Image: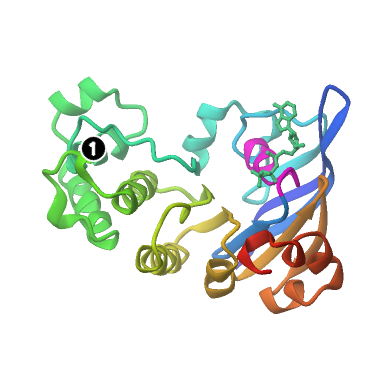
Amino acid sequence: MGTILEINNLIISFDGFRALNGVTTKVEKGEIRFFIGPNGAGKTTLLDAICGRIRPQQGSIIFDGDKNIMHYPEHKLVNIGIGRKFQVPSVFTSLSVYENMEVSVVNDRSIMASLFQPITKAQKEKIDDILDLVDLKDYCDKKAADLSHGQKQWLEIAMLLVQDLQLILLDEPVAGMGRKETIKTGELLKSIAHHCTVIVVEHDMEFVRDYASKVTVMHEGRILDEGSVSQVQNNPKVIDVYLGRGGGNCA
Ligand SMILES: Nc1ncnc2c1ncn2[C@@H]1O[C@H](COP(=O)(O)OP(=O)(O)OP(=O)(O)O)[C@@H](O)[C@H]1O
């Protein structure tokens, strides 16, 4: 399949404090990669660096073979195929599900342009397919404000998918979900991974166990271990700093 993301010796400091202290990892195309670890380990900082929110002081982030994206501004990363979803859903609550999708289908469209310029047949078909995938086809006319928490999360994922991204970054996508919604989200990630790589920061270890292709464990700005779920959860160091201390609901 090939490598989609290659991170080399990444260093990020805040006022002299090293939030990332030499992080090196590779993510292969089609993976569902989970980043786990105790609070303050550097997981969110790493996602912020990948999506251009924070400029690292050292290292490199190579995307899709040859693009060093470390100095790309955040808004340009969507155009090359990288999208981020934050923990709190940020859909347009006053618009319908379908209107949210119309706004997203061409990512430089403004809300006004989206509402007054018709989308193409191909874009409409794409929206329909993705709404079907996230199980929101029957909710097209419903205001996003009136969706359940889980449905808002799925709509936001759908709004990323419609932009034809190659890499999606998700920050605790199942936080606040019940088990049924969590399983549905996991199955959705599996479907997405057929055509897009997914990186997830997560604390829910049951979710990680059920859906990770590979897990990276972070601690104090470094990678403590990386491998299959069973490999990392049997690593005594990982148990010591995270799992055995009640991290990841696993105590
Ligand atoms: N803008 C900032 N200024 C100063 N320190 C920061 C900043 N952002 C993050 N940090 C610090 O960097 C470290 C890593 O934070 P980060 O949010 O990446 O951890 P995390 O692994 O995502 O934790 P959590 O699981 O709690 O979200 C923490 O000690 C945090 O306080």
Determine if the magenta segment contains residue 40.
yes
Residue designated by label 1: 145
Determine if the magenta segment contains residue 83.
no
Q: Quadrant of residue 223?
A: bottom right
| Residue 244 in view | yes
Q: Quadrant of ligand 1?
A: top right
234 sits left or right of 213 in the view: right
Colour pattern: rainbow
Mark 1, secondary structure of its residue: helix
* Amino acid identity at mark 1: Ala
105 sits left or right of 124 in the view: right
Q: How many labels does the image show?
A: 1
User: On the rendered image, what quadrant is the N terminus found in?
Assistant: bottom right
Q: Residue at x 27, y 50 (%)?
A: 148
Q: Is the magenta stretch mostly helix, strand or loop?
A: helix
* Magenta span of residues: 39-49
Q: Which residue is drawn at 27% across and 55% down?
A: 130
Q: Residue at x 82, y 73 (%)?
A: 235
Q: Which residue is drawn at 63% across and 42% down?
A: 47
